[in-house]
Image (cartoon, helix red, strand yellow):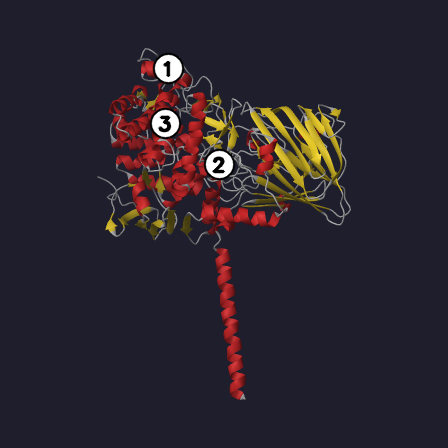
Amino acid sequence: MYFMRYFALFFFLAVYMVGCKERAFDKSTEQELLTQYIDPFIGTGGHGHTYPGATVPFGMLQVSPVNGISDWDWCSGYHYSDSVAVGFSHLSLSGTGIGDLADIIFMPINRKVDLLPMPKSRDSLSYRSSYSHKNEEAIPGYYQVYLEDHDVNVELTTSLRTAYHKYTFKADDEQSVVVDLGFAINWDKAVGASLQIEDPYTISGYRFSTGWAKNQKVFFTAKFSKPITEYDIVSDKKSVEGDLGQGVRTAAQLFFEAGDADELLVKVALSSVSIANAKENLEEGAFDFEGTKKKANDSWEDALSKIKVETTADSLKTIFYTAMYHTQVAPVTYSDKNGQFRKENDSIVSAENFTAYSTLSLWDTFRAEQPLLTLIAPEKVSDIINSMLAYYETKHILPVWTLYANETNTMTGYHSIPVIVEAYLKGITGFDAEKAYEAMKVTMMQDERGLAPYKKYGYIPYDELDESVTITLEFAYDDWCVAQMAKALGQEEDYRFFMDRSKAYEHLFDGDTGFMRGKSKDGKTWNEPFDPKYSNHREHTDYTEGNAWQHSWFVPHAVEDLAQLHGGNDVFTQRLEQLFTESSEITGSNVSADISGLIGQYAHGNEPSHHIAYMFNHADKPWRTQYWSRYILDTQYNTSPNGLSGNEDCGQMSAWYVFSAIGLYPMNPSSTYYEIGSPIFERSTIEIPGGKTFTVEAENVSDTNIYIQSAALNGEPFNTTSISHQTLLDGGVLHFVMGDTPNKEWGTD
């Protein structure tokens, strides 16, 4: 009897312990979910210009709150400093410096309002509401906020092409939704809209607008979980009789029977082509909000898992995985479920065997965002290139900055070219390489956007075009990229031609001052007076969104030659050091707001500076690359809403962090090599397509141990400051031993 009692007790304890272990394991597994480290509010403050709303990786929809203010820091429609919402839109920009979109606004409210007055600002909107960050939440694929003025809790989630809304009203309150197609923010302006009540559960319509995207056409449909019992439609200050409203400013208030449920669910889908396509994009079946929310989160978990980092500092994981998140919200899916999409000229075409993407911020993203995608989403890269080639078919020139398939011609250069060349040289297939080469060559041989004087003089004279220095340097890099693909395709004559043009930077280097400067048509006279700290935003200036200090280093394809122009490595690196230690004063009466994140005159808040810290590697001082790249990592990113030092720019600001934090950076993307910096994680493992992994280990790494003492690649000594993309694809382990003092022998000649 005693034995049986003892055995029973032992068995109970054993089962209990196993259960505890299982629960601990489950808890541990749950804690290892990477999505828990994402904070979508990072970048919504300061000048980050990100949005906190729900989306999936590269999703067509970005369903997010709209504050209703037209101002630079509200380019995404939302800023963390605000506390008023005018509704929830379905298209948003992530981190751009120009505002547009915020299309198809839905706003749940609990009372009847007057929609007839034409609002001049959000203050005159009868349906606006205040909210508090205390009652606001954002996680990957999900957003929630409580509208204080209407006593409505709003929850949003989305799939690739269908947005889901869940509104929870206060018991016995009016259940109503305003759909406003006329309200606009920033550069956007409605030029036509239509809204129709199709049946008690369905509405549809369109919104045409002009702004940054000059010809934007958005068609939509929405289904509700409850029947519409009453509705008011207004168009251009007039009430509409019937179920169809059309006009420039069209809006409707829909009323629903409360019944015994306080929840109202909505599904919304969009299309650039037609209402019929929007209906096809709309997911069928039940209003499965929770299921969609879980699938959205799961899709983010999969997207984040391409790179796994190990560190005891959760704050670093938050910054890193939020950065990974931001690198995969754009570009956005643009083609419909049936493959169709609208071009800027209103032609409708079909994406055959690829998904069309838009929101291509190429001046920013060619630097690190696109190179990151070649590692974590190579299939997206070929689709992006096919999207650019579809644009070329219409315009006979490669895109500069496309928004909703509209060419905005924003920024300088033709940086679709390095994206294509990098992909081809990295072995990414799925696009027509010969057609892509033709498109690049035709683009660089036409006369638009400064190429005419560039071809005539070998550089762009300052008295021919504003921003002449920046444009010349960027054309020179684009030429170098074309040359690399020409060589790979056996086009030797083209290779020599474009390589010769890629030396255009030599014309603008002033050996006396050490800066790239505006030069006149005579080939001798510099633009005077000269102040390297002077900035004049986008007009009567030689530099784009910056000054001579920030733009004189853009020769990523010929750093060794640039160093020789300076007088050798010692002078070159002394001037690089001065860039980081010079006074941060910016002179001029119209200073570009994009000059932010200053470390001396280095401006991490804008993209032209992003490669500079890695140039020491090419001048035999890699320990200075290690020092400055770590300093930037430590000072320019944090976990607050102000956690980005400048515009996110569709993933570029975050891509810099992702690469640099694991100790690599694509200083010259089309070279297919990564510069080595200073890793901050004990271990970073990149999942390589085909089942391989490449791991970067940093033994003894800490806040002070930032310098590489020694390195080994797959167990063999490694003493070079760059590593090829192919080496990463082959898989393996790059092991660093870190210390608190520089090893000036490692990585030098």
Position of residue 527 relative to residue 689, above or below, is above
Mark 2 burial class by Cα count in 10 Å: few <14, some 14-19, many 20+: many
Q: Amino acid at mark 2?
A: Ala
Q: Amino acid at mark 1?
A: Ala
Q: Nearer the viewer, residue 115 or 66?
A: 115
Disc 3 and disc 2 in contact, CB within 8 angstroms: no
Q: Which residue is mark 3?
A: 435
Residue in view at x 46 percent, y 30 percent: 361
Image quarter (top left, top right, bottom left or bottom right) of the C terminus? top left
- The tally of labels here is 3
Most distant residue in the bottom direction: 1
Q: Which residue is mark 2?
A: 330
Which numbered disc, 3 or 2, marks the residue that appears first in the sequence? 2
Where does residue 554 sit, x and y in percent of width and height? 35, 28
Mark 1 falls on what kind of element?
helix
Answer yes or no: is residue 511 visible: no
